[in-house]
Image (spheres, rainbow, N blue to C red):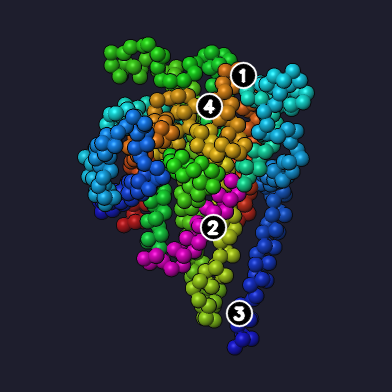
């Protein structure tokens, strides 16, 4: 009996390894098949490296108020010399803020994406596999989450709970899971009827084992697709919240930099070197996610590519 | 008809659920909602009177029931800050939001449809190779940052447009209609509307393009080609008409989404709309006003989702017959 079971069910480790290697193979064909996705991956890699080595890349403490040799506030310096991108109105180094902001953006983006996709995948698996009342209840919950205006909700949450990045992540996770849950649910519903699931059921695997060991690896690539889009959404949302003034005041993020520039009238003074770079960085990270998801979409669903 | 009723009941359910979540969210927030009212000079009796006036002495269940019945009768309570009914304050700025949203959506969709059809037709050319990344980039740009760049260049540097608000201060109008059709109002509207339009055009463009690509492969297009019809006739008369339907649905969804999403753009341009009202109310801890503005935005979103669903159902015979 034990022997037969092992034949029917390859070891979990082997299965996970094989699905990882499948991804790696898919990933390694990206540069040839889709230059967009390749560009996205390279962009991500650059931002990740900047975030990791931020401490040695900065030239000044991004929060330190700087003074010049005559002990006057080093306010609104133009780029050049000691300050690659000049200084802010309150005398802080813009370049160092920009570099430090990468870390904050990536941490928020990746945590939020992991939360969104984890909830979406689990809900999609449960709703799709069990069907019936469970499915109806979960999908009604999804409808409600889709009926809540996204940004206003995160604003209220961030303002009333104490301002911190984690409340932004929490709000994003609470409202953005339905999209991935719906798609994964549909996929699970077709997988449920396939022969290998029937085989697992016959060998005595319970519903949870079937869901997470047999079905989950087959929808994980979909989860990955949604995750790469969710990273961008989270970073945009965090920036908007910080810009509106509901972000944490003790950390330097791109949204905070833009809010600082807007509030100190950098627009009127034409300090483009202050408020253009953070925006370009946000675009860079978000667009990298878009490019990667496009590439994966075409590899996962070749039918779309005609 | 049964579909219509079912969908309607669904809409009411979602509205009720969101209103309930909202009510309990605002009630369980830390701090007393009267914090904005109470200062050193408020006596204990005055505090009690205030608490009674806002119904805060009743149990949570009673308060919830009052909130629901009052909201149904169009009464959302009194704003702490403005000392006026919330509905009045919200309705004062709501038209501004609607005008901003509709103007930018119409511009975005007209551009998106034409450009999307064009990109589909030029599939595989350099135009596409350049256009698609560009569109994705505009979708990745934060709206408020786009607004800031436009504001810095067109308003502060070139001085072509005013830098904020909806009307120059000191101007007087005989009617609201005259106010919103005046040149002054239009020049204030231009920059925020363009900002939003740049942000919004990506969706209709990409949607139109992929629909066109699908439609162009269908047999009736081959048939039209075989009949010797000109390219122009095929694209406009045959393909585009069939590709437009999902875009029309997206438009209705867009109205719902944009009214809530306008928050940042309205803030950048100090546009007196409902999004900015919400931000200010939240920042000033004006709970009833924040709750009312939020509810209004939700109502628009949910009603527009409903209209999109129903219109799609009635416009596309394939969907209609499939669900019967």
Residue A116 position, x and y percent, is 52, 53
Question: Seen in the image, is B25 located left or right of residue B131?
Answer: left
Helix, strand, or loop for circle 1?
Answer: loop
| Mark 4, residue position | B147
> Real-space Cα distance between discs 2 and 4?
34 Å
| Mark 1, residue position | A270
Helix, strand, or loop for circle 3?
Answer: helix
Q: Are marks 4 and 1 in contact (CB under 8 Å)?
A: no
N-terminal label among 2 and 1: 2
Residue B176 position, x and y percent, is 30, 19
- Parent chain of label 1: A
* Residues rendered magenta in the picture: A108-134
B152 to B85, vertically: above or below: above
* Marks 2, 4 in one chain: no
* Marks 4, 3 in one chain: no
Q: Which mark is residue A118?
A: 2
- Parent chain of label 3: A
Q: Are marks 1 and 3 in contact (CB under 8 Å)?
A: no
* Marks 2, 1 in one chain: yes
Mostly what secondary structure, the magenta segment?
helix
Q: Residues within 10 Å of mark 1 (few under 14, many from 20)?
A: some
Helix, strand, or loop for circle 2?
Answer: helix
* Marks 1, 3 in one chain: yes
> Real-space Cα distance between discs 3 and 2?
28 Å
| Mark 3, residue position | A8
């Amino acid at each position: 009996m034990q022997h037969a079971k092992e034949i029917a069910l390859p070891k979990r480790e082997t299965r996970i390894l094989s699905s990882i290697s499948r991804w790696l193979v898919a990933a390694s064909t990206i540069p040839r098949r889709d230059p967009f996705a390749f560009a996205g991956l390279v962009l991500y890699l650059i931002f990740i490296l900047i975030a990791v080595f931020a401490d040695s890349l900065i030239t000044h403490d991004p929060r330190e108020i700087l003074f010049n040799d005559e002990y006057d506030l080093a306010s609104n310096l133009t780029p050049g010399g000691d300050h690659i991108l000049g200084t802010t109105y309150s005398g802080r180094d813009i370049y160092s803020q920009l570099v430090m902001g990468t870390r904050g953006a990536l941490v928020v983006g990746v945590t939020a994406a992991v939360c969104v996709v984890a909830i979406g995948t689990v809900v999609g698996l449960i709703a799709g596999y069990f069907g019936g009342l469970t499915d109806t209840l979960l999908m009604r919950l999804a409808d409600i989450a889709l009926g809540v205006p996204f940004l206003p909700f995160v604003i209220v949450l961030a303002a009333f709970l104490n301002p911190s990045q984690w409340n932004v992540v929490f709000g994003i996770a609470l409202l953005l899971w339905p999209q991935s849950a719906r798609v994964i649910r549909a996929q699970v519903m077709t997988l449920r009827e396939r022969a290998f699931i029937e085989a697992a059921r016959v060998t005595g695997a319970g519903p949870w084992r079937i869901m997470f060991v047999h079905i989950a690896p087959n929808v994980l690539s979909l989860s990955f697709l949604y995750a790469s889009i969710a990273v961008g959404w989270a970073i945009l949302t965090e920036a908007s919240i910080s810009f509106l003034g509901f972000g944490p005041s003790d950390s330097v993020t791109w949204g905070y930099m833009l809010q600082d520039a807007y509030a100190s009238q950098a627009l009127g003074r034409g300090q483009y070197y202050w408020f253009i770079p953070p925006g370009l960085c946000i675009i860079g990270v978000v667009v990298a996610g878009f490019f990667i998801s496009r590439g994966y979409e075409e590899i996962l669903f070749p039918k779309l590519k005609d | 008809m049964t579909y219509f009723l079912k969908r309607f009941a669904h809409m009411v359910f979602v509205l009720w659920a969101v209103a309930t979540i909202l009510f309990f969210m605002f009630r369980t927030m830390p701090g007393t909602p009267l914090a904005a009212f109470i200062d050193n000079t408020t006596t204990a009796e005055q505090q009690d009177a205030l608490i009674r006036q806002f119904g805060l002495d009743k149990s949570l269940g009673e308060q919830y029931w009052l909130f629901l019945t009052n909201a149904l009768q169009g009464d959302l309570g009194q704003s702490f800050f403005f000392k006026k009914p919330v509905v009045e304050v919200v309705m004062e700025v709501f038209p501004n939001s609607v005008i901003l949203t509709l103007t930018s959506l119409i511009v975005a969709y007209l551009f998106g449809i034409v450009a999307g059809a064009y990109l589909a037709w030029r599939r595989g050319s350099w135009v596409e190779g350049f256009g698609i990344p560009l569109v994705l980039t505009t979708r990745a740009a934060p709206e408020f940052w786009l607004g800031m760049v436009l504001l810095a260049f067109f308003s502060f540097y070139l001085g072509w447009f005013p830098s904020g608000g909806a009307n120059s201060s000191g101007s007087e109008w005989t009617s609201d209609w005259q106010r919103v059709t005046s040149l002054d109002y239009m020049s204030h509207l231009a920059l925020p509307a363009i900002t939003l339009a740049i942000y919004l055009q990506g969706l209709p463009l990409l949607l139109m393009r992929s629909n066109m690509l699908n439609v162009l492969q269908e047999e009736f297009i081959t048939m039209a080609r075989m009949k010797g019809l000109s390219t122009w006739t095929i694209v406009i008369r045959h393909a585009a008409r069939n590709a437009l339907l999902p875009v029309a649905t997206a438009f209705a969804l867009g109205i719902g989404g944009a009214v809530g999403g306008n928050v940042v753009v309205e803030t950048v341009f100090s546009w007196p709309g409902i999004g900015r009202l919400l931000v200010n109310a939240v920042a000033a801890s004006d709970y009833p006003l924040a709750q009312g503005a939020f509810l209004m935005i939700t109502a628009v979103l949910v009603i527009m989702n409903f209209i999109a669903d129903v219109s799609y159902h009635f416009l596309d015979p394939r969907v209609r017959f499939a669900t019967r």
